Amino acid sequence: MHHTPPIESALLAAMSSQAGPMGARAALGHLRQQGFAVSESTVSRLLRELDERALTRSLGKKGRVLTEEGRRAAANLLLDHRRASTFADALNLRDVHDLVDHLAGRRGIEREAARAAALRARPEELAQLRKMVETTGSGRWQERLGFHRTIGEASHNRQIQAITSTLFDERLDPLEHLLVLIGIKQEALVRWDGEHRGIVAGIADRDPDRAERLMVVHLDGMIRDTELFANSGNAYVIHAVLAEIESR
């Protein structure tokens, strides 16, 4: 898949929204309005590259228009942007209700991740998961944060990997810290750790049904513990952490 640089995406979007040809000067002005510090030579080079890739066609002094391939590329970029914006908004958690919904969504994804990992995980990934659940002491904290992310990677399902890589992006680590805090306050960490070991055992035994079932049990418990924590006068703690994440 071709990775489109932001400046190219902005130019294709501008040409797509324009009724007629776009000249180099108009392209330069548009890009500068979008915050790109570009020179005329840079824009000229970019336009030539788009011509070479058959995304644009020169009409001489009138400027350039998108080809059919260029219009498809611009439409796909717009769709990608809308998807990314929708996903980002879904991860912008604001209150207890959003957090519970987030965990419920994770349950749907992670049950399939555990099932797929039981069928597809490589020997070195199984060894890594075993090591993670056997870690004790101060290192246990970090292993808890990476456990679910690692299962997503071990699923070797590209759709699941793409979603879990976003769900467990390092920028959301404070959210995972919050969940660990909830586990501590609800005296649930020992149970969670035991559930982690059971999930890994199901994956290692190549038992997808067991791995999936135990993951559902685990997320169900996390949802219940979160609701109990919030309903015990601690909703403000959740709101404060979520506000901190949103402000980043």
Image (cartoon, grey):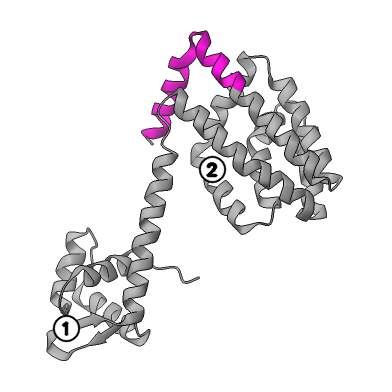
Secondary element type, mark 1: loop
Instruction: Check residue 233 for magenta coloring.
Output: yes
Q: Which mark is residue 63?
A: 1
Q: How many marks?
A: 2
Q: Residue furthest top?
A: 233
The relative height of residue 85 versus residue 141 in the rendered view (above or below) is below
Q: Residues within 10 Å of mark 1 (few under 14, many from 20)?
A: some
The relative height of residue 52 versus residue 197 in the rendered view (above or below) is below
Indicate left or right for 150 with 7 as reference: right
The magenta region covers: 224-247
**Tag 2: residue type?**
Leu
Q: Residue furthest right?
A: 205
Q: Main secondary structure of the magenta part?
A: helix
Instruction: Check residue 181 for magenta coloring.
Output: no
Q: Position of residue 245 (x, y in %)?
A: 42, 32
Indicate left or right for 237 with 154 as reference: left
Residue at image position (34%, 67%) is 75
Query: Front-most of 151 and 44?
Result: 151
**Tag 1: residue type?**
Gly
Residue at image position (65%, 40%) is 148
Indicate left or right for 142 with 94 as reference: right
Q: Position of residue 204 (x, y in %)?
A: 84, 45
Residue at image position (66%, 24%) is 221
Q: Position of residue 209 (x, y in %)?
A: 78, 42
Residue 130 seen in this snapshot:
no
Secondary element type, mark 2: helix
Q: Quadrant of residue 38?
A: bottom left
Q: Position of residue 235 (x, y in %)?
A: 46, 16
Q: Which quarter of the rendering shows the C terminus?
A: top left
Residue at image position (15%, 74%) is 19
Q: Which mark is residue 167?
A: 2
Q: Residues within 10 Å of mark 2 (few under 14, many from 20)?
A: many
